[in-house]
């Protein structure tokens, strides 16, 4: 593939996948340099059909306000808020990007994708109540968590989240924290809005039903990408200076196809999800909240149980879950052979080692697969005691592919975060992993720019433009109290969401 066809199309940037990650990166690139030739190819018939789809994710707008897994208790009994602060302020970067687009009339109405919905953490039992109180005290010592409230009073909890207390019969200790500044985000709708911005710009082309079949690096460090139109069967080749693999669960296999040594060590482990969903408006109107609880022992982070208000396609629903499951698919619209195609012999040891090291997770997934609908309803009733079977139905969520990579001590290590993998020339970058995902798309795109497009953000003119998009760029909202409050007040006003 190094002998290029003279008629071969040449572009500056090739984006694989039409989800929130590729569209966010594409918008950044176009804002910084409108002349860039950008090509986007998606295997499915339209954008945002996998993890970015509103029904395939929690839409929490992860700001580490209510997710207890971001604030682990250390061996000495103190609460580690390092990860929480990181995720919390990364979501601020997304808010700043979206505010810039709304302010510049590139998105006409922010309520097409974001709504104010308070975030709550809810626990039961003496041990978890003590943990939540300690967490609250630690977080509220930092300015990023200004406005967080805590209560153990059942009457206050009932006022905050009525469904949680309706007909609750036992007298076990309860506690809840509230952050009024929480949001619900429809990442599917947002992806389409971002794609519309790109499609209305010059030198941008998007192709759907177009599957990347192969990719090879050329002698001049560019990439030749072979794509097949799944409707016509026609195969073409495109030459690109930079290649972004933002294809969700398919990213692992595409990274292997690239042949770069940096990517060959990675494998993937898929975890599927199921929601319980109700569209009963009488129930939905009583719960303007996202209520998160504690995860089961051995469960993956994305399986923390929560009862969420959702705003999707102009309608309100409640989702509860997600319940984890196992499928060998890497994508919801993928193949059951995905897992087996993703590794060869050298991957077997890391894969087996990761399975052995995560036996609790294995047992948990087996239990979830065998779980009946009535068992799911019983867990829902720990959040909503009055829940009735006839009001709820199953909604299949998206696939999440966790990272497995070799570990010098354990052989293989399973990781639940996101990871950027690039070649030594920074001409290719793949985004792997699942959580915190879409909420930090802006932060991830900025990391891609810094790593692979330093020339685009270093000149004075471009840096000035970037700071127009992200006013806090180059500064720390974790360290700067005044800047943090200023940015949050401004973005809340533009996006029509709550501020304290």
Image (tube, grey):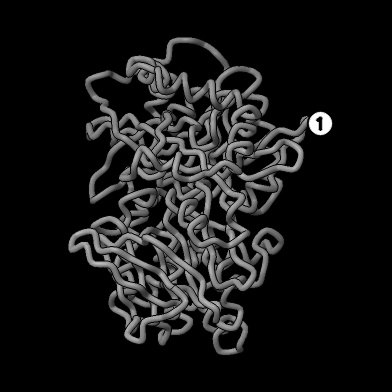
Whole-percent x, y for residue 459 in the image: 61, 88
Q: What residue sits right under mark 1 in the picture?
A: 76
- The residue positioned 46% from the left and 68% from the top of the image is 25
Quadrant of residue 69 within the rendered picture:
top right
Q: Nearer the viewer, residue 117 or 396?
A: 396
- The residue positioned 47% from the left and 73% from the top of the image is 223
Whole-percent x, y for residue 163 in the image: 37, 26
* Total count of labels: 1
Q: Among all residues in the image, which is located at the extreme right?
A: 76
Whole-percent x, y for residue 138 in the image: 71, 41
Q: Among all residues in the image, which is located at the extreme top?
A: 170
Secondary structure beneath disc 1? Answer: loop
Quadrant of residue 177 within the rendered picture:
top right
Res. 185 in view: yes
Residue 48 lies, with reference to residue 196, above or below; the image says above
Q: In this rendering, would 295 be left or right of 142? A: left
Residue 252 lies, with reference to residue 9, above or below; the image says above
Whole-percent x, y for residue 381 in the image: 39, 19
Res. 488 in view: no
Work out which quarter of the rendered image holds the N terminus and state it. bottom left
Quadrant of residue 371 within the rendered picture:
top left
- The residue positioned 41% from the left and 35% from the top of the image is 328
Q: Among all residues in the image, which is located at the extreme left?
A: 232
Q: Nearer the viewer, residue 332 or 314?
A: 332
């Amino acid at each position: 593939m190094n002998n290029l066809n003279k008629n071969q199309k040449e572009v500056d940037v090739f984006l694989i996948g039409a989800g929130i990650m590729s569209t966010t990166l594409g918008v950044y690139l176009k804002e910084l340099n409108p002349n860039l030739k950008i090509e986007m190819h998606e295997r499915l018939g339209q954008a945002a059909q996998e993890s970015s789809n509103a029904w395939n994710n929690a839409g929490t707008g992860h700001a580490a306000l209510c997710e207890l897994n971001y604030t682990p208790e250390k061996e000495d009994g103190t609460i580690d808020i390092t990860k929480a602060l990181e995720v919390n302020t990364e979501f601020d970067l997304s808010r700043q990007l979206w505010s810039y687009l709304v302010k510049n009339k590139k998105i006409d109405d922010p309520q097409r994708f974001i709504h104010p919905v308070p975030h709550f953490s809810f626990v039961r039992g003496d041990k978890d109540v003590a943990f939540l109180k300690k967490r609250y005290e630690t977080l509220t010592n930092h300015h990023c968590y200004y406005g967080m409230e805590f209560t153990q009073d059942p009457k206050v909890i009932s006022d905050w989240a009525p469904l949680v207390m309706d007909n609750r019969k036992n007298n076990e200790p309860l506690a809840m924290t509230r952050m009024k500044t929480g949001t619900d985000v429809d990442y599917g709708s947002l992806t389409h809005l971002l794609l519309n911005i790109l499609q209305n710009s010059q030198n941008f082309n998007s192709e759907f039903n177009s599957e990347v079949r192969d990719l090879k690096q050329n002698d001049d460090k560019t990439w030749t990408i072979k794509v097949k139109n799944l409707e016509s069967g026609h195969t073409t080749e495109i030459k690109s200076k930079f290649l972004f693999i933002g294809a969700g669960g398919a990213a692992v296999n595409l990274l292997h196809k690239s042949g770069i040594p940096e990517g060959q060590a990675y494998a993937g482990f898929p975890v599927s999800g199921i929601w319980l969903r109700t569209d009963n408006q009488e129930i939905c109107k009583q719960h303007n909240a996202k209520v998160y609880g504690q995860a089961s022992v051995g469960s993956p982070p994305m399986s923390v149980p929560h009862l969420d208000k959702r705003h999707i396609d102009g309608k309100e629903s409640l989702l509860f879950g997600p319940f984890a499951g196992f499928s060998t698919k890497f994508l919801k619209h993928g193949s059951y052979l995905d897992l087996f195609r993703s590794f060869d012999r050298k991957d077997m040891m890391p894969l087996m080692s990761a399975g052995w090291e995560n036996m609790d997770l294995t047992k948990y997934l087996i239990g979830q697969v065998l779980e009946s609908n009535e068992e799911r309803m019983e867990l829902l009733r720990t959040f909503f005691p009055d829940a009735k079977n006839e009001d709820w139905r199953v909604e299949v969520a998206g696939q999440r592919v966790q990272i497995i990579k070799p570990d010098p001590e354990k052989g293989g290590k399973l990781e639940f975060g996101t990871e950027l993998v690039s070649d030594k020339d920074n001409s290719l970058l793949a985004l792997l992993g699942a959580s915190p995902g879409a909420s930090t798309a802006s932060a991830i795109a900025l990391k891609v720019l810094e790593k692979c497009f330093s020339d685009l953000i270093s000149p004075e003119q471009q840096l000035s433009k970037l700071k127009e998009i992200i006013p806090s760029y180059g500064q720390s909202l974790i360290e700067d109290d005044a800047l943090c409050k200023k940015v949050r007040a401004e973005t809340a006003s533009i996006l029509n969401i709550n501020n304290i």
